[in-house]
Every structure is written in structure tokens, then in C-alpha cells.
Image: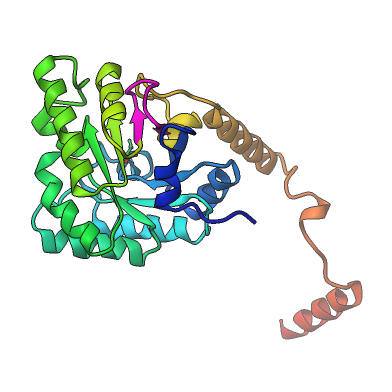
Amino acid sequence: MHDKITVRDLIKKKGKEKIAMVTAYDYAFARLVDEAGVDAILVGDSAAMVVHGLSSTLPIDMDTMLLHVSSVARAKPRALVIGDMPFLSYEVSTEEAIRNAGLMLKAGADAVKLEGGAEQADKIKAMVKAGIPVMGHIGLTPQRYLVLGGYRKRGKRIVEAEKIIEDAKALEKAGVFAIVIEFTAAEVAKIITEEVSVPTICIGSGPYCDGQVLVLHDLLGINTEIPPFAKKYADLRSIVVNAVKRYVDDVRNSVFPADEHYFHMKDKDYKELVKRLSKQI
Ligand code: KIV
């Protein structure tokens, strides 16, 4: 039995050991990814798209995210569980941000993640003061894809790169324990990783971060389309489709269920049953 990974353990890994984080949205997969040895499980708002089939992360709400967080937490993973704050759960006011983040912890998360840079600093400070560990998320922030003009690469131009670096520093100052850097030029992620004291976790931002994160459905090959920066480590889609096809064939051909999949009454009880039923007619 290993000790539970804490926010402190992740911070201590900076510069020493790479951090492996992956998303999971339910009990079953949380158990599997934990058994595989990940350091952190992100209950991402990507659930909106990969689990619920929505076209962006904007529609997912707190109640749905809390269901996913509690399902993951029930797996009692060794990995740190991070609940992703959905769109509009933290932007409106500091009070709402603290209350909603608190609900994530009550549902079983060990920490929360929210998107945005310097503009979120005051809220993050207040959340940390309230005892809530916060992970930042900069670069491509999918909850702001409408303002950004799509799921665009970030930090290729100098002015944009400078802003992302400033955001990272503001998050560090506000008290985050780690920062996700999404779809940002590798050089920018490298500078941030060298300049902040907390771990950086990359997705589509190159190899220089302190760790990496992938969406589980991309990694397992459940989705047909995956982002250019994701790597497919398995083809679960074809494994699932083939298994279910074989099941469908077996049912249609009366191959399933076989003898070992069902049970019988005692012969004498069956005969008695038939006798009783025949008397009722
Ligand atoms: O929701 C999510 O899966 C994320 C990752 C892409 C970092 O925020």
C-alpha cells in the first residue's frame, strides 16, 4: 500500500522527476489509471466533449462535474485527484469561486484547476487562503475559445509569449501549486518552467515542462479524432467495437449464453412447478 500523493509531493518532483497526469471521469477508469501509476488524475471538464458528446467544454456545469469527481474519488486513488472548475463556476465572484471549489473538495477532490492567468490571481489567492489547493491553466484555455478565435496555438508571437509568461508568474505569486500549459510554443513553456518555482504540466507544449497531461480518451484511442499533440497508446475503439460485434453475433446465433452462463432448478422442483401450473389452467 503506497502513501497518497499530496500537492507537496508534486511540488517536490519539480526538477527531479517528471510528473505524469491523465484525465479520468469515473470510478472504473480512475482505478485503472491509478493502478498504472499516474501521479495525478485530472477530472477534466473535457468530460463535456469526450463523455457527454458536447461540442465544447462550455455547457458542462458544477453538478455534472461533482458527479464525475465523486465517482473518481470513490476509487480511492493514490494519485492526487484534481477537479476541473467548469465555465462560470469561478469567474463571477470570489465568493462563488470559493464555494464551488469547496464543493469539489467535499466531493472528494484533493485540489482544483481553473483556467486563466493574471486576471484570476485575486480569486486564486482567496481560494488558497480558504484552504483550497489550486492548479492554474494557461496558454490555450478552451473555456475561452470564443474569445481566442478557436483552439489556436499560443505563444508563437513575442507579445503573446510575454503575456503567457506574465500569467504564469502571476499564478505562481497567487499561490498555485502547479500550472498546466496548453498548446503553447515549447520555448515559452521552457522559459516558464525555468522561471517559476512550481511544477509545469504540458499538453501540446513540448518536452521541457515538469510533467505531461493527456486526455484519457485520446491516449486510449477511444475517439476517432484526436488533437495533433496527443499520442494514441492503444486502439480501444476497435477492441470495444470488435468485442461487442462478437457478442451481437453470439446472441443472434444462440451461442451466448452457453451452459456456464446460466443455472437450472432442481429437476423435481421443475416437475412440481409444471404440475402446479397445469392445475391452475
Ligand atoms: O479538461 C481537461 O481535460 C483539461 C486538460 C486538457 C488539461 O483541462
- Magenta stretch bounds: 200-213
Furthest residue toward top: 157
Q: Identify the image quadrant of the N terminus.
A: bottom right
Q: Is residue 185 magenta?
A: no
Q: x, y percentage for residue 149?
A: 11, 25
Q: x, y percentage for residue 77?
A: 52, 54
Q: Does the magenta stretch include residue 206?
A: yes
Q: x, y percentage for residue 69?
A: 39, 56
In the rendered image, the vertical position of residue 126 relative to residue 217, given as above or below: below
Picture residue at 47% right of the left edge, 30% below the top: 219
Question: Which quarter of the figure has residue 118?
Answer: top left
Question: Which quarter of the figure has residue 68?
Answer: bottom left
Horizontal side, residue 10 vs residue 56: left or right: right
Residue 56 in view (yes/no): no
Residue 44 in view (yes/no): yes
Q: x, y percentage for residue 11?
A: 39, 44
Regarding ligand 1, which quadrant of the image does it lie in? top left
Foreground pick, 94 / 59: 94
Foreground pick, 153 / 63: 153
Furthest residue toward right: 268
